[in-house]
Amino acid sequence: MSLIETKELSIYYERSPKREHGPMLYIGGTGGDLRNKPNQLDSPLKDYFEIISYDQRGLGQTSKPKEAYTMKQYADDAADLMDKLRLPALPVMGVSFGGMVAQELAIRYPDKISKLVLACTSSGGKGGSSYPLHELQEQNEEKRLETNIKINDLRISENWIKENADDWKKLKELSAKRIQHTPQQDGFVNQLMARKDHDTSDRLSLIKVPVLLQGGKYDGIAPPKNMKFLSDNIQSSTLKFYEGGHLFLIQDKKAFQDIISWLKK
């Protein structure tokens, strides 16, 4: 079990084998837990990069402080992990909530990042917030699962469900199976509340490194207009959209191919 002790936390992290193009930091999304397999360390990136990823505060096998969390703390946690591992400036990829953390990291610790990949994420504020997942906590488990599926991919409409009842049933079963380890409630809620307050919209010009922005055409959590705002306000950025929703990295194999090609340049 790999744990790093920082001033505030014991951070659980994992590393894939070393590869030709060196290390990269991968910051996962809402409710992320490295015990859920497959995960980012099993992605196509592993054939080219040493992937370093971790459970964020309140989740998985990392410490779960009781007090409220802030986006500043999430960025500080990532920076502390990098310091403890003595990592040089390296590529960072942030997905969904991880993309919000990565924005804060790039703004607060610009010298730690060489290139930045932001996938299916939002700036908050005037750039638009991602779907308010904290509101789903009021729903029962089945309703929350169904809502999550629908907002992940806007092609799954009520008409689609009526016309594809068997596929809808299978989709719900597969979605439930993806989460082998459910988040500990207090830590997860603290993450959702920090996420609600995320706002880098007035500070995006402070991100100076090259940025690859990736979005799903049918994403109802981080909609295309939010990705477009990031593109319009980050100087050295490239924006690409893919066939899929919030899970386009799984749905469109070209997405990882583009990341690998862009990072290798």
Image (spheres, helix red, strand yellow):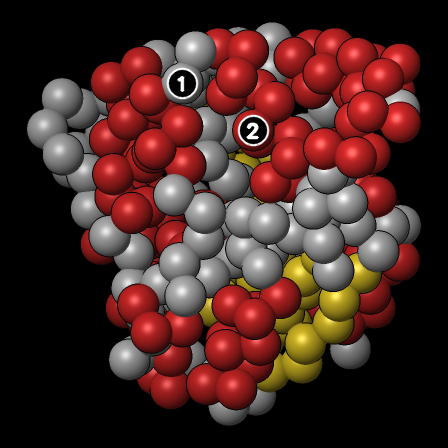
Answer left or right for 173 relative to 10. right
Q: Residue at x 80, y 60 (%)?
A: 242
The answer to whether residue 185 is above or below residue 155 is above
Q: Which residue is mark 2?
A: 147
Quadrant in the rendering for residue 169: top right
Quadrant in the rendering for residue 187: top left
x and y percentages locating residue 257 in the rendered image: 86, 59
Badge 1: how crowded within 10 Å, few (<14), some, or many (20+)? few
Q: Which residue is mark 1?
A: 139
Q: Residue at x 89, y 27 (%)?
A: 163
Badge 2: how crowded within 10 Å, few (<14), some, or many (20+)? some
* Residue type, mark 1 in image: Gln
Element at label 2? helix
Q: Residue furthest bottom?
A: 235
x and y percentages locating residue 84 in the rendered image: 34, 44
- In the image, 157 versus 60, the foreground residue is 157
Instruction: State the CA–CA distance, disc 1 to disc 2.
Output: 9 Å
Answer left or right for 193 relative to 256. left
* Residue type, mark 2 in image: Thr
**Exactly how many numbered labels are in the figure?**
2
